[in-house]
Amino acid sequence: MGIYLTRRLLQSLLVVFGVTLVTFLTLHLAGDPTYLYVSDRASDEEIAEIRTRLGFDRPLTEQYIQFMTNVARGDFGNSLVSRTPAMDLILERLPATLELTIFAMVFALSLSIPIGIISATRRGTVTDGGVMLFAIFGQSVPSFWLGIMLILIVGLQWRILPISGHVPLLDPLLAGDLSTFVNNIPEAIRHLIMPGITIGVFSLSRNARLVRSAMLEVQSQDYIRTARAKGLRDRLVITRHALRNALLPLVTIIGLELGFLLSGVVVVETVFSWPGVGRLVFNSINQRDIPVVQAAVIVFSFMFVASNLIVDLLYTRLDPRVRLH
Amino acid sequence: MYLTLKLRVLIAVLILALLPLVVSAQAPGPDETTLIVAQSTDVTSLDPPQVGARPESNVVAHLFGNLYDIDVAGNITPSLAEDVRVSEDGTEYTFTLREGLTCHNGEPLTAEDVVYTFQRAADPELAFTGNTPGFVFSSMGYVDARVDGELEPTIIIDARNSIALGLITEVRIYCMDTYEAMTLEEAANNPVGSGPYRFVEWVRDDYLLMEKWDDYALFDPDTFEQIVWRVIPEASTRVAELIAGNVDIITNVLPDQHDAVNNSGVAEIQAVQGFRRIFIGFNFTDNVEGLPGAEEVQDPAVRVALQYAVDVPTICAARLGVECERANGMVNAPNNHPELEPYPYDPEQAEALLDEAGYPRDENGVRFEMILQGGRNRYLNDEAVILTICQYLDDIGVQTDCQIQDFNTEFIPALVSQQAGPMYFVGSGGGNWNPLYEMADLAGTDSNPNYGRWFNEEWFSSWDRLAEVGNPEEEREIVLNMLEIFYNDPPWLMLYFQPDFYGVSTRLAWEGRRDEKLYVQDATLR
């Protein structure tokens, strides 16, 4: 177990290093970032001066080595735009993004499993057809369009949920301000529902289809037939025998889910004015605020690698046949 | 059975828990003391010399006062200063500050604070990249500042410059002791201003809250106690929030959303004829040599012919949703040339002039090829406008390759490094307070924003004459002559002055400005 963990951590570091290198090169291949930090009225001399000041006149290898050396010391540099430490900008927005992704994951998982089971146990019925139709819709509808539709219908027409904005939940919790945390819960959830559904509906649909097909496969196994032959009630057969095995592929997907949801938050955060990391990264890429993009990439890579590692460890609990080497 | 019961209880609990979420009141909207403004982008820094973009300067203008201000009519009026004296040679501006001014932490605001404000912005060690140390200081020829009395700061410039005072209005003032004690990061995040509103809280990418500073010397007591600047990037979401009554003013309303706002009964569209000049520039540099159209744009006769090819009023009506008249030059009314007629849409005349200039149609109907470049999503409906212009050029036999690029990452770097074009679509801010402010776009033969490096000897020698004249009549005469040069040897294909569309709650008495400055400190309830 120890050797496995060490090897996985080293692999993770390599992944993060590779991602930062690719990001760094991509940002520079898009052209000279200096022009994003000068007025469009700047003279050639001013442009050259700012290029030197920002260090963009140095060789790329030198810039990258300098950056990684600083990162190793815990210094991610300052944002070129706001002059604030890049990691601070990420960390102050991270709770909002986590709230959204956690809500979306909970929404998607809590509904996809029962929907998948119902669909599998009623295979070929109208219910099954309806569920699959919904799943196809959920996987094909663009999140941008869905978000706008929810805003117009639920937020503006029916006026039952706030159109945009964010009420912090994790921030007061992390700050130890429990009373604010508790007071914020109702409004925070109201603000989370529409963006959470928008971001989670794809996962919900995909996971429901996955659970359905896994359940169908498991239900044809001998041990299920044996369980039924023993006289166990159908509900027990499904929950105790079939579901546990059918969930294994879903657990694999959950490991990748975080990465998918994080990439999806950019659009949803923009539509719902959600002050999260997705918008920060999007704006920083546009402004080629390299320190912020790099810091975000490192944070996202770590989160993604860590969630996959946790899933791998969970596998051993769910399936005793799996051993870590 | 037991499980079923449990499930039922669980569902009932869930419904009960969700009920208050559904039936509780909608998100609180603006109240009688709070004004809510929604812009598309957030502030990146609240340190005035680091501020560049318009959404930032809108916010900062409410937190920090300026020495003089420009009103909607284009008059330069006293603000923190009550008077200004200009030295005989025009290089020193000595201001007299109002008595009893303070910054928001109570620190008295005196001449040394003004001097510090200017010197800090220009300090190369601090490496500010905002509008003040960039455009403002370079355009006014800033040299230094000094204290001439407790309330008398003097700003020194390198030569007589009739737009210097107008440019000084852009410089936002703060207190020396406060800012000397701050790190750059603190200054960017926790401003201590000198303007009508005091900074309270900023949640990045979410909102910025400010409250009325009662000690502000020029304050109107009827204005709102608090202003909330919300960040709502998506245009449809901004409109929805306005119609729902959750915000009072929104910016950049797209033409296709005007009806929704106007039919809502709670808000209306305010169309403001802006000062921003939208035009097509010609690139005369070697950077575009060999590209289609590069050789042809060197010929003034071709450039004049192209002016007749584009139907500007139709573009305004069809693409921008407003009626507009074509501009007759680079200067807004009333400072424009009163006698020059805007080029009319006359494709036959355009074709005749191109024939005359030696560019007849070939067997395929093509006179010559051209590249027209432009950025996407920067100006109102820019992509549609650019495509329409390309079609107009095609119609007169100028086969145009329309290249629409990402504005920030592709187009601006090409523009600033003089590699856009040979024709490029762009806009430039304007004003009505002095024509030279707008003409300064073409103040140098080898400096931006003369992106195409246009050269006309008479035009550029006129700038030297302007630096020598001391009276307005003589200056006006030179300006009119320069505008004629611009008209006859056009470096731009002048299109229109861009309209701005604000969505404004009907509860509000407020009027948008033509210079794109979103000043809401004078907004009141109807």
Image (cartoon, grey):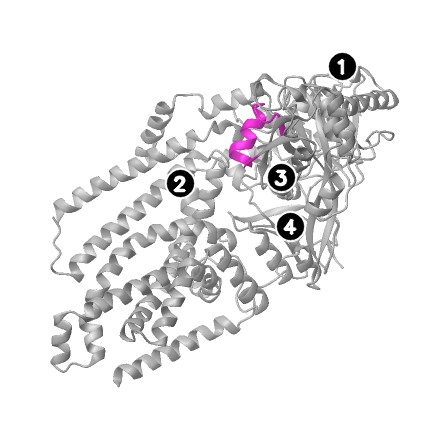
Classed neighbour count for the residue bearing mark 1: other residues with Cα under 10 Å, few (<14), some (14–19), many (≥20): few
Residue flagged by tag 1: what amino acid is it? Asp
Classed neighbour count for the residue bearing mark 2: other residues with Cα under 10 Å, few (<14), some (14–19), many (≥20): many
What segment carries the magenta color?
A: B403-424
Residue bearing mark 3: B387
Q: Chain of mark 2?
A: A
Question: In front: mark 4 or mark 3?
Answer: 3
Question: In front: mark 2 or mark 3?
Answer: 3
Q: Are marks 1 and 3 on the same chain?
A: yes
Q: Chain of mark 4?
A: B
Residue bearing mark 1: B464
Quadrant location of the N terminus of chain B in the rendered image: bottom left
Residue bearing mark 4: B254
**Secondary structure state at the residue bearing disc 3:** helix
For the residue pair B496 and B37, the one nearer the viewer reads as B496
For the residue pair B365 and A216, the one nearer the viewer reads as B365
Residue bearing mark 2: A87
Q: Is B244 placed left or right of A255 in the picture?
A: right
Which of disc 4 and disc 1 is earlier in sequence? Answer: 4
Which of disc 3 and disc 1 is earlier in sequence? Answer: 3
Question: In front: mark 1 or mark 4?
Answer: 4
* Residue positioned 47% across, 51% down in the render: A267
Residue flagged by tag 4: what amino acid is it? Leu
Q: Are marks 1 and 4 on the same chain?
A: yes
Q: Chain of mark 1?
A: B
- Taking the magenta stretch, the answer to whether it contains residue B469 is no
